[in-house]
Each structure stands twice: as structure tokens, then as C-alpha cells.
Amino acid sequence: MSAGSRYLERLNDGRNVWIGGKPAGDIREHEALRGTARSVAAVMDLQDDPELGPRLTYRTEDTGARANRAFQNPRSPQELAGRREAFYLWSAATFGVMSRIGGFYRAQLAAWHERRSLIAAEQPQFPDKLDAYFRYVRDNDLLLTAAGHDPQVDRSKLTSELGDAYAALRIVRETEDGLIVRGSKMIATGAPYMDEIMVSPHSPKQQAEHRYAVMFAVPVSYPGLHLVCREPFHAEDTEDHPLSGRYDELDAVLVFDDALIPWERVFIHDDPAAIWKIRSDRLAASLSIHENIARLLAKLEFTAAVGQELAESIGIARFGHVQAKLSELQRQAESVRALLLAAEDGAERHESGVREPRLAPLTTAKNLGNRYYPRAIEILQQLSGAGMLQTPATARELDTLAGGALAPLLHSAYGGADRGAPERVRLLKLAWDLVGSPLGARHELYERFYAGDPARTYAAQYAEYDKSALIARTLSRLGS
Amino acid sequence: MSAGSRYLERLNDGRNVWIGGKPAGDIREHEALRGTARSVAAVMDLQDDPELGPRLTYRTEDTGARANRAFQNPRSPQELAGRREAFYLWSAATFGVMSRIGGFYRAQLAAWHERRSLIAAEQPQFPDKLDAYFRYVRDNDLLLTAAGHDPQVDRSKLTSELGDAYAALRIVRETEDGLIVRGSKMIATGAPYMDEIMVSPHSPKQQAEHRYAVMFAVPVSYPGLHLVCREPFHAEDTEDHPLSGRYDELDAVLVFDDALIPWERVFIHDDPAAIWKIRSDRLAASLSIHENIARLLAKLEFTAAVGQELAESIGIARFGHVQAKLSELQRQAESVRALLLAAEDGAERHESGVREPRLAPLTTAKNLGNRYYPRAIEILQQLSGAGMLQTPATARELDTLAGGALAPLLHSAYGGADRGAPERVRLLKLAWDLVGSPLGARHELYERFYAGDPARTYAAQYAEYDKSALIARTLSRLGS
Amino acid sequence: MSAGSRYLERLNDGRNVWIGGKPAGDIREHEALRGTARSVAAVMDLQDDPELGPRLTYRTEDTGARANRAFQNPRSPQELAGRREAFYLWSAATFGVMSRIGGFYRAQLAAWHERRSLIAAEQPQFPDKLDAYFRYVRDNDLLLTAAGHDPQVDRSKLTSELGDAYAALRIVRETEDGLIVRGSKMIATGAPYMDEIMVSPHSPKQQAEHRYAVMFAVPVSYPGLHLVCREPFHAEDTEDHPLSGRYDELDAVLVFDDALIPWERVFIHDDPAAIWKIRSDRLAASLSIHENIARLLAKLEFTAAVGQELAESIGIARFGHVQAKLSELQRQAESVRALLLAAEDGAERHESGVREPRLAPLTTAKNLGNRYYPRAIEILQQLSGAGMLQTPATARELDTLAGGALAPLLHSAYGGADRGAPERVRLLKLAWDLVGSPLGARHELYERFYAGDPARTYAAQYAEYDKSALIARTLSRLGS
Amino acid sequence: MSAGSRYLERLNDGRNVWIGGKPAGDIREHEALRGTARSVAAVMDLQDDPELGPRLTYRTEDTGARANRAFQNPRSPQELAGRREAFYLWSAATFGVMSRIGGFYRAQLAAWHERRSLIAAEQPQFPDKLDAYFRYVRDNDLLLTAAGHDPQVDRSKLTSELGDAYAALRIVRETEDGLIVRGSKMIATGAPYMDEIMVSPHSPKQQAEHRYAVMFAVPVSYPGLHLVCREPFHAEDTEDHPLSGRYDELDAVLVFDDALIPWERVFIHDDPAAIWKIRSDRLAASLSIHENIARLLAKLEFTAAVGQELAESIGIARFGHVQAKLSELQRQAESVRALLLAAEDGAERHESGVREPRLAPLTTAKNLGNRYYPRAIEILQQLSGAGMLQTPATARELDTLAGGALAPLLHSAYGGADRGAPERVRLLKLAWDLVGSPLGARHELYERFYAGDPARTYAAQYAEYDKSALIARTLSRLGS
């Protein structure tokens, strides 16, 4: 049985997925979910592809079995480059649109595993618990997402100041078997399609909030866990909605209703400092952002290609101001690719033996990305103008409207400079799915914010930058 | 019978509206159309409102009956200000989202009527034909849209160079009864909801394209005319989709399949110069853009209010960088309001007796608007972050999920700093309808492009600006 | 004797002006200062001009003599419009480049005079002292500047936390005759050319800083007051540096070296709250910003005219992308003019009887201006490219180089599309003076920051905006 | 004798340098020129530095002598990386501010030398002439600049349509000894400090303009050649003007007054196509842009360091919005560094045996640079606010003003959060030299335009990009 088939089989586990107030049931059959489930399975299957499989997987040292490359912490320049290639291929399979099929959070888990002894003093059981969990996820090829934000409610207050109403997830009490937790965590991207969820605060907690400082992992189908999904953005017709028909990684709010988390899955609790120490470790950051940027590259190449085709299809690619916009899309992709290479080029051997990609180019790419993607979408708007709105509701109509009587006129009206009406309409539908669908709008929000509020991520980059080296290379010579 | 009821009655006239390959039938009943039809009727009914009616209508000199103020060419400062107020009230009734309920094209028709003798030399029958049509539309309170763009196909060529395939509408032949026309015109905004359509080229045609240079008007239900609609963006639930549920002014491509246009409705044909002369008349431009800007103001006030509420609802309105964004939304509205007032303040008496609003402030507002609105949407994205995606699919779920068992947790998780969960979810749904729905995406495209490609409209503004006055006020004094 | 001559006579009063470490002596003769002094005098003389004089001055009620219109608080729409016209004419006389010839701070003083009883309870002597000072300044047609910022030193601390070193001006002690003050105030724009200086904190002080909370006025030549000037940006040749040769309003840091401020000139001391109450009064704000915006308009018209001429002079004004830039300059001026009109159009009667221009349009213009001007300069850069650097050092050379032997070649090489070499070189020199001279660079900084850090002024606009009216006009109707 | 001394000796060769209408004479002594001449000599001397010399030079194969690395066409990854390092070190010695000390045009000449047989068919003598010239320049360590733009005059016309007045340089006639040329070429950056000038059209000429299509080289002191300099931007005091006092690479217009160019220095004439073929060769482009980007990196690191210091010096580097700006400066440098590495990483073996850096990352860096630098300057403005204007005219004054009596107050007032007044004033002077001096303004123009009008260079990037590879990587997979 293929990796994808095993994945689909695992999905029917009674998970509490709520959509529009109703239980979703078997998500492989649910109208709004089955398309994406199939897409995920298809990506999983790439691991069995004779050509791609060997590039997407590696042989683990301990078991000798092959596992997804996201779990491999690179120990040589070749492994580092191979890891990037695997992330790129994996992401490019869905044009960078499916952002959470096992890339980022798997990589993060592997990096924490590498660094698990970092907090052994504070949390003596952490290394063993995490080791067991890492092997479990890796060896079963499980998909992992995470949730770590508290409900927005009132951002000018600490979570612990929000009263007793269990808005944000917190510990209710300890029992012999584990922790009872209650409240919500936001926002678990793609959770309905995942196997496992890692829960921990994504921003530092203060000591006063210690009851909110808990890191644990549960299967998606865990008792007491409810997935309250946003409105689905799927579309039924993959021809008219090539992206929305396939790649709606439904976000969900996790509501824990007195769920009992067994102790072996409670990695840390009541210790904000320890959680933040492992979360903010530099190696963990650089290894996981490495995945982000490979995905970003796949997505920016995709938008650049769509822009190019839009321009060619209506004969405007020869105009200077259009070329200027198209080359801006190329510059986006070239910059991000260069930063990825520079991170690897500057990689040094971490004390753990891992080849650590340099963080500065990676955070540079991440912080450029949250402006690049919205700008790319704006350029697609500018290139197409109202063209994307001048398509029939379905491509089929070209031939069938009024019993086919209008076909010659419609083919003329919707044709392009270099392609016929069916191809041009398909292209416009694709562009609109990026620019105008709810799925596309969610992606713009995602790229802007997935890594945190830009105001904070920009500031963080300054804080971690090697500023003395900069001064040494420049101003120090001015006095001489 | 109210104006809205009369309107709804008129709609069932057998119009050839195609949606997704199927005939729409009675659009008052069609699932995707009825919501918007009802909204249009409600706006029409405002004319019968005891308080608003007198401000939205005027008494015509010739008939003594009341008509919509869009048909009145202002002859005094009071009439000019009243006209603006009427446009503003009319637009604000749909928050500036319904852009084509009879404002702009009615105003344009009234202005052409005022200037109808401008091309009497070239087109001796034009004045009388237009006079009859104007009275017909005005006195029956008909809604009018227009279409004037050729299919994009290949923008680097003249329409007449695109071959013989009747992509763009052109004259097939003359008959005793009228003109036979064939081909397509793009894009008739809101056409399925209108009474009448004015067809004419929206950019200047060259003499070589004279067979494409025809100006005529037909009822929407005219034989030989097909409305090929884009995919509808409507939503069924007005609670979860307050805008998409009400205001989807469905765009349509007009396909003329050898329609016979009777001579009294053919205002001009085979005369590109005459068409452009009336279309580009300065008075006609300023009187119709006057409507655009009143509508823009209503829309920018709406986005500013939504931004303010978003910020208040999560307690971030006290942060400096948030206030900076909110005040930018205020500046947008204040600038546009000021430009509207300045156009009226600088109005002079046109030779026709009309009080002509000054064009420079109006085109300034128009050319600021195509950047303001996308920026407003970006600010809404920045204010809400992922918040808009962290709502349940429907607001009802708060109380009904799992038989109500999760209600306390859900009300906590989705509550806001200053309002309860139902109100906050409603607000987020509204914001998402602006930012993330296809209707919202269409509006961003609309505001960017409705007045033409910005590159061209910016250049046009320079061309028509009074440059010598500028030099006189400044540089001329430098030498002294 | 003319107003300008009286002004020049007053200048030679032994003021302690330091330039490059040396006393400037009689500034009417100083190489770096005399050009600007002459320009100021010329503007003063406009009050005696038969055509302009009556528009720039008004007859005071109490004395019956004429005074500069900056001192008049408008009591009718006509007076308000006349006031704006006076500010505009006054500023346009120096193309908006001389920002401080008695406009803003005179207007502010007049507004405080109007509102002097506002703090009569806390500061019983304030009304009378200010009344006397106002009449003295007005009736002698004195020029007034102000300084109110503390040295930057460490912006993350309160001034009172900076130690005992008298960086910022503070009270040393009281005596029978007045206050002894010591320390510095930044930055007194144009101080060397002024008659009087108003000193007070330009941002709110806390009670802990009460010794820094002092408001007083002194003549520029006051004993114990030193003006430490920045490097002069003047140029000697007004032909090659038309602006730098005339309009370098030299900024100065004021250093008070135990100056004794007599009690009648100490308006408030040790009372941060009272100072801020009068400073932040809304009427005072709107009356003084009214002047700012009239000046901004003159400056933006000037840059728009320069841009237009640059484009015409090399034959590029017919290109679409150039026209787009030129029309952007026009939009800047049109917006600011419209906001000025809107502020007057919306003016209401203040309880004092003053016609109060509406603040929201004025702050909108102010907050647009700090982006508009830098953008205008960028556009001038883009229009000219390297052209501004391709001029000979002096225009004279065209004819004199190598004894005139190269004149034909030089006239050819430096000629323009529509004008000869001398005219084109003059234009490029003017443009470079705006774009590339230190005076020009200072102006860019000035426009960005004169009204405060934009981050703060944007936030302040939000705070003072009528937000409930906005909601009432829009969202309140959504539920219905 | 050192390289710098030999350089200075060569300068006194009677060159016709005109400044402000007067002959400059010995430029090593001229007040406005000597500072920069000394800076150039100091950079030349780095070649003799025991540590840097070996990195800045290489041993030529044919002579065995060492020459500047700009002349070496890299044949291995090591040589390519070494070449970049040499360019970086060379540029960093003047903080990237001296853009033309023998880097770019030397590299271009070396690349043309590599490709000299490319036009052997059309121009049989070209290879030998260029070979001789290349060896001459290289072996004598000569500095080379170039000029290739025609006077702006009327950009909407071909040069050949501008009439008979010899505005642009063109061929007057051929003689046995060479070509007689007359007219002007713009703009020879740093020409007064150079040894040699390469003249050729920098944009493609049409056949109708063949008399303007001439490529030749002359020594700067050539008879009949006049250098008409722009106004010098030097400053005398290097303490108060650390950049303007050292690095004013004076631009000059070249006026040829019937100069006779000997045939061995006339590389091509009357053949626009051949000139453009060698100029637009891809290898030549990538080898010379490689230098540009190394220099750009040095400059962006410099501006990033200045920004960082400005923020630290007034205690604002801990504020989030300031950190966001500082990290933007870091992102600029990181992106450009990454693109440089990516160009080398992707280098392939050219048929000539040269290791060819990949062009796409280099043009990406170039096209980002023309926006990055102006934005960096804007950030410096925003960080410092008016601080840069609040310095005394000279740093000396702190101690000497009023005979030292004000020293304590001045040291307090001008001190910083982390440094004393002298250091802080020095930093502000440096920042102002970048932001506010004419030299700084020229640099902003330079970075915007040195590589051509951005509108054109963006379009060119699209044209040369490998678009089919982009489609292959992305859209081609969509159909499957």
C-alpha cells in the first residue's frame, strides 16, 4: 500500500471536525474536504516515485528504513542541499500553495529532537519523551501541524488577565494519568488533514501565565478535542478552480473540552522559560525556516510564471511597463533563491554536528516574503485588469451555450493573442483563483502573517543580527 | 406601487441571461440573483421615502413630475451640492459597494443630453434621437448600464487587425429597419439587473475601425442579445456574508448575435470622431465623475469605519502604529471629501447654463482612488491579521455546536475586547467579505480599473491640466 | 522708511550669533547671512506694495493701524479666506521655501492671545502678560520664531532623567527680577533673522520635569542667549544657486547661559499642565496649521512647476510614464488646495467668535505633506536623471570658456528641446538647488519632521478624529 | 615608487580640466581636486600593501608581472571568488562611495578583450587594436573611465535628427592619421582623475546615426579634448565633511573640439551593429556587473552601519519601529550579498574558458540597488530626524566657542546616549554628508541611474530572463 493510501486510511478515525455547525464525518467523503485529502495523498505518494522518492526520503541511521527528508538534520553540505531540494520538490508539487503538508513542523520537531538536551536540567524528562515522540512520528510518516496562539480577545492584555472564562487553553488540573486542559488554541493550519498536532505557546509567556505554558502533542482524533473549522474555501470543479478545487488546507480553531493529556505526551508544563528556550534556539529556527524559504521559492516561481503567461496571452509582454512588472516577479524569485543558497553557502558546523544554515539570509528571505507575495498578487491584478472577470462562469460554456449556437462568437471573444479561448479561459481561471478566490485571499494573509506580525519579525531580525561585524567591516575604518 | 416594485416587475422580461451555461430564467427567483435584485429594489424605494425622497429626486421642468436627481444637470450651486448629496445618499445605501445602480451612466446620459447639439453638424439626427431616449429613460426611472470595451485578445493590435471573426462587436450591414450588429462588448457591470444598456466604444477608435464605431442603446431583453455572466459571487446567507449576500452586481459580457438595432436607437455609426467628441466633452466628464467621487467617498468612509471597529474589537486601537493606519483611512476619506467640495467650490457657469464642477479636483480624486482603495484593503488585512480566518463557518455555531455543549468555551474564545462573540464574529465576517470574498476581490479590481488603466488616466490628467496657470503662479516670478 | 528697511535696521542689535566658532557680527554684512536677510526684508516690503499690501495686512480694531494679517483671528468666512490668501501670497513670495518669516508663530501667538483666559485659573497673570506681548509684537511688526525641543541625547529617557548637566534648558533659580535659566533648546528655525523667540516645551512634560516646563519670550539679542548655528547652506551666486543664494533660514541651537528672564516675559513656569493646555487647544491648533497648509500649497505648486519645466525642456513631457509623474505632482497640489478649502468650508463659529477652520482636513493635509514633499523631490530626480549633474559649474562658462572658443559647442550641448542653453542650464541649476543642495536636503527633512515625528502625528490624528460620526454614517446602518 | 605615487605623477600632464570657467591647472594642487586625488592614490597604494596587495592583484600569464585583479578574467571558481573579494576590498576602502576607481571600466575592457574576436568578421582590425590597448592599460596600471551618452537636448528624437550643430560627438571627417571628431559626450564620471577615457555609444544607435557610432580611447590629456566639470562638491574640512572632503569624483562633460583620434585608438567607427554586438555580449555584461554588485554591497553595508550607529547614539535602537528600519538596512545588504554568491554559485564555463557568473542574480541585484540605496537614505533621514541639523558648524566649536566658556553646556547639549559630544557630532556630520551634502545627493542620483533608466533596465531584465525554464518548473505541471 502506498504512502498516500496509508494516509487516507488513517484519516477515518472519528476526529471531531465541525464544519458549519455539523460534524464532517469521514473527511475522505465530505464534499468540502475530499479534494484536498486526495491532494495530500498524492503528495505523500511522491515518496514512492522511482525518480523523486530517493530525493524526498533518506535512510535513517537507527532503523535503516527510509523516512521523509524533513526528519533529517543535515550533517554535510550535501545533506543540506539535498534537504532544500526535497523541501522545494515537495512544495512545488502543490505550487507552494499547500504550506503545511509535513514540511515545517516536521522539520521543527526534528530540530527540537536534535537539541532535546538543551533543557534537560530544567525538564529532565523532556529528552526521552521527545525522542520517543519524534521516532513515532518519523517512522509512521505522520503529518504534523501545530497551534500556539491564544484567541485575540484583547491584545493589550496578558492572557492571564482575560478572566476565568477559559478563552485560551490552560491547565485545569493535574491527575495521575496526565493533565486536564480546557480552552482554545488558534489556528491549526490544515488540522483536519493531519495526523498529529503539537500544542505550545508560539510567543513567550510570562511567569504569571504559567498555567498557559504547556507543550504537548495529541492525535487529531483525540477525545475532548474539537476542530472548529472556518468556512471552507474549496470549490467542486477543479477545471474552473484549479487551486480551490485541490488545495484548501482548512484552518481550524482547537477547542479542548477537558481533554486529558497523558503524561508521556506532556513535554513541558508550567515552565514558560523552558518552553521558550527550546522554541527560540537558533539551530531550531534556522533548520525550520530553511523549509519555509524553499516553499516560498516554489510559490514565487509559480506567481512569476502566471504573470508571464497572463501577459503573453493578451499580447502585452512586449510593452516596457509590463516587462518591468514581470521582471519584478523574477527578481522576487531570484532574490529568495539566492538567499537560500547564501544560507547554505555560509553554513557552519553546529556543536551538535549539524550543518547549520546561516540564519541572517533565511530571516531576510522570510521578511522579504511577507511583502513580496502581496506585491506579486498586486502585479497579477495590474497585468490582467478586468480580464479575469471577463470569463464565462465555466469553460465548458464556450461550446455548449445556447446549444452551441454561440460557440464561434464565444471562441472569438475569449481567445488570446497566442492561444485559443479554452486555454486562455483556463489561465484566467487559474489567475483568479490566486487573486480573487477566498483561498487566494487567505494565502495573501498567510504569507503576510504566518511567521508573525511583520512589525515584530523585523525587530527580531535586528536583535539577532551580528551588528559588531557590520561595524568592524565599515565604520571602524573611517577614523584611520 | 413603489419604485422598487415597479422595477422588480420590469425584470421578468425574458432577458437572455446565461449563468454557468444555463438560462437564468426569472432572475427575481434565481438563487444567485434574487438577493441583489432585492437590494436594488430597496434602493429604488428610497425615492419614496418621506425624508430621503425629496433629496433623491427633483421636479423636471418639462413634465413637472419628479425624477431621479442623476438626470438633473445642476444650474446653481445649490443644485450642484444637492446633486452630490443625492449621489452620496444613494451610494451610501449600499456602502458604496453597488457601483452601478443608475448613478454614473444616468448622469452621463443627462450630460450628453445637455451637450447633444455639439455634434449636430456631423450627426444631424443625434440631438433628437438622444433627446427622445433621455426622456424615455428619465421618465420611466429606468436603470442604465453601458459596455464599451472590446475583448482583450491582443492589446498590441487595433481591433480591425484582429481578423474577420467578430470578436469585437461590429456592424454586419445596414437594413431599412436598422443596423445588424454582431460580436461582443465587455464588460457590462450589473447588466442582468438593469433596464437598458448603452453601447459605444469607451476608447477612441481610428478611422480604419469605423465599422466598430457605433453608439446605440437597447433594452437588456433585446432579441439577439445574450448576457454571458461571470461566475456569481453571491452567497446565500446574508448574516455570514453581509455584502456577498446582497450586492453582487453580476458583470456580463454582451454577445450580439446579429441583433437588429432600430434606427431610432442608433445614435451614431461609422463616425469615430463624432463619438469621441461627445464622449470626451469636458462638461460630460465632470458631471459624470462627480457621481464617481460621491460614491468613492461613501466606500472609503465604510472601509475606514470597518478598520476602526476591527481595531477596537481586539483592543489594539490604543497602539501608535495601529492609530497611524487608522488615521490613514481617515485621511483617504477626508481628501476625497475635500476634493469633492473643491470641485463644487470652483464650479463655474458653463455656456450651457450648467454649473460645471471643476474637473481637476475630480480627476485628482479619481486618480487617488485607484490607489486608496487597495491600500484600504491592505490596512484591513494588517489590522486583523489572521483574525478573519479564526471564525467559525457560521455565527450560529457559537450556540449550536455539539448541541450547545461548547457554547461557553466558544463565546469565550471568539469574544472581543469590547463586545461579545456574536458581535465580534459578525464584524469579522463583514471584514472578510470586503477582504477575502470574490466579491471583495472584484471590488479591488473594480476600483483599480473602472476608470481605465491608471497609466493612461494619470497621463490624461496631465494633458488636461491648466499648466500655464501653474507656471504663472510660480516660476514666472523667479526671474524678477 | 519701509517695513523691510526698519527690519534691517533692527537686525544690528549685537545678537550673539555664532557661525563656525566665530561671532557673526552685523548679520546684514556677513557673507553667509546677508543674502537671506535681504530676502526677508523684501518680503516685509510687500506690505507696502499698493496692490499686495491691503491683502497682506488688516486694520486692527484697537489701534486702527494696519498690521500683518497673521495677527488677525478671523471672524467671518471672508476674513478666513482672506487670511489664507495672505499666508499663501506671503509664502509664495519665496516659493514656500522660507518657512518661518513670521507666519506660523505669529499665527500661533495670535491664537493663544484669543484663548488667553483658558488658563486664567491656574495662571492668573498669563492673560495680561500675553496680551501685552501680543500687542508689542503685532504693533512693531516683529518677526517671531520658537524653540521647544530638548537636545536628543537619549530619547528613551525623560529629560529629568538625563542628569544634572543642563543639557536641556531648565530653571536654575528664581530671583526678584525674574527667572535664571540655563541649558539648550532646539531648534530655532531662522533665529538669526528674527526679532523675537518664544521658548516653551513643544511636547508635553510630566510633573517630574516641572523645572523644564517654562514658557517665555526674549529678543534674539538677549544677554546670556547664544545662537549656535549649523553650517550655513547659503551660496554666493544667486544665478547658479537661485534658492541657496537667497533663502537659507539658518537654524540655530539656543544656549542659555544663566540668562535672566524678566517676570513680565515669563508667561508660565513649573506648570506642565497649564502649558500643555494652551498649546494643545484646538482653536490654536487649527488657526496655526491653517498657515502651514497655505505655505505647503505654495511649495507644492513650485515643485510641480519645476517638474513640468524639466520635462518640457528635454522633450519628454509627451511620454505617458512622464505624464503620470507630472500629474502626480499636480494631484499633490490639488489635494492640498482642496483640503484647505474644505477646512474653510466646514468652519464653524468658535465660542470666542472666531471662525474656526475645521481641523480634520488641515491635519490631513499636514500628514499628507510629510510624504508628498519627499515624493515630489524623488519625482524631480526621476525626471531629470543625471541631467542636473551635466551642467557647467556656472552658466557664464557657456560663453567664456577658453576665451569663448567653445561657445558654439557648449550652446549646442547644453541646449534643450524648447529653449536655449542658458535657459536650460538655469532651470537645471534651480532643480538641483531643490534636489541636491544642502538647502534642498534640509527642506526634505523639514517637511518630513517640522510638525513632529510622523508616527506620532498620524496617531494624534486618529485620537482627535470624530470617530462616532463615522460609525453613524456607515456601520450603524448595516444592521437595519 | 608606490602605485599611488606613480599615479599622482601621471596626473600633471596638462589635461584641459575646466572648473567654473577656469583651467584647473595641476589638479594635485587645486583646492577642489587635491583631496580626491590623494584618496585615489591611497587606494592605488593598497596594491603594495603586504596583506591586501596579493588579494588585489594577480600575476599575468603573458608578462609574469602583477596587475590589478580587475583585468583578470576568472577561469576557476577560486578566481571568480577572488575577483569579487578584490572588488569588494577595493570599493570598501572608500565605503563604496568612489564608484569609478578603475573597477567597472577596467573589468569591461578585460571582458571585451576576452571577446575581441566576436566581431572580427565585421571589424577585422578590432581584435589586434583592442589587444594592444588592453595590455597598455593593464601593464601600466592605468585608470579608465568612459563616456557614452549624448546630450539630453530632446529625448524624443534620434541624435541624427537634432540638426547640424554638433551637440553630440560625431565624426567630422577621416584623415590619413585618424578620425576628426567634434561634439560632446556625457558624462565621464571621475574623468579629471583618470588616465584614460573610453568613448562609445552606451545605447544602441541606428544605421541613420552611423556617424555617431564610434568607439575609441584617448588619454585624458588629449589635445582637442576639454573636460567641462560640474560644480565641485568637495569640502575642505575632512573632519566636518568626511566624505565630501575625500571622495568627490568630479563628473565632466567631454567636449571634443576637432580632436584627431589616431587610427590605432579608433576601435570601431560607422558601424552601430558591431559596437552593440560587443557591448551587449552577455559575458561582458556579467563580468562587469559583477564589479558593480561588489561595490554596491560595500556601500549598503556602510549605510546600514551608519543607521545602526545613529540609532544607538540617541537611545532609540531599542524601539520596535526603529529596529524594523534598521533590519531593513540589513536585509538590503544580505540580499545583495546573497545574489553575488548565487551568481558565482551558478557560474558556468563559458566557451572562452572563462567562469561566467550567472547574469540573472546580478541584474536582480542591480535592479534592486536602484531602489535600495534611495530607501537607505530615506531611512537615515527618518532615524535622525532633525538631529543632523542640530550640530554646530564645526566640531571644534564645542571647546572653543566664546573662548571655551560654553564648553560644558555644549558638551551636554550635543552628547549622546552612549558617546560624548565630539563622537556624536562626528557621526551626525558623517550622516549628513551622506544625506544632505551635494555629494550625497549626487550619489542618490548615481545609484538610481548609473546603470540606465530603471524603466529600461527592468524591461531588459525580462527580455534576457530564461522564461521557458520558469514555465517548465511550474505551469507545465499544472495540466498533469
Image: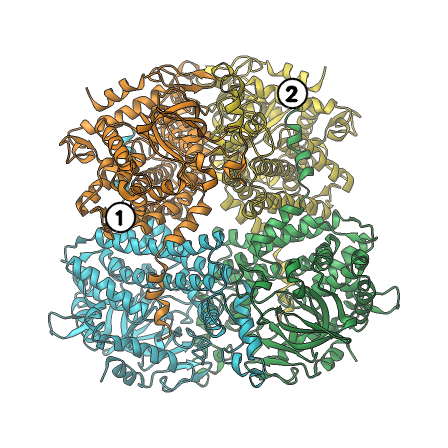
Chain colours: A orange, B yellow, C green, D cyan
Q: Is residue C259 left or right of residue C406?
A: right
Q: Name the quadrant containing residue D273.
A: bottom left
Q: How many marks?
A: 2
Q: Which element is circle 1 on? A: loop
State whether residue B75 is above or below residue C294: above
Between residue B310 and residue B370, name the one nearer to us: B310
Residue at image location 49% in from the left, 50% down from the top: C320
Neighbour class for label 1 at 10 Å: few (<14), some, many (≥20)? many
* Chain to which the residue tagged by mark 2 belongs: B
Report the Cα–Cα distance between label 2 and label 1.
Answer: 62 Å
Residue A357's disc is 1
Neighbour class for label 2 at 10 Å: few (<14), some, many (≥20)? some
Identify the amino acid type marked 2.
Answer: Ala
Do the residues at pointers 2 and 1 share their chain? no
Identify the amino acid type marked 1.
Answer: Pro
Residue C192 picture location, percent across and down? 65, 76
Q: Is residue D464 visible?
A: no
Between residue A206 and residue B311, name the one nearer to us: A206
Between residue B190 and residue B93, name the one nearer to us: B93
Q: Which element is circle 2 on? A: helix
Residue B41's disc is 2
Between residue A232 and residue B97, name the one nearer to us: A232
Q: Is residue B145 visible?
A: yes
Residue D41 picture location, percent across and down? 30, 79
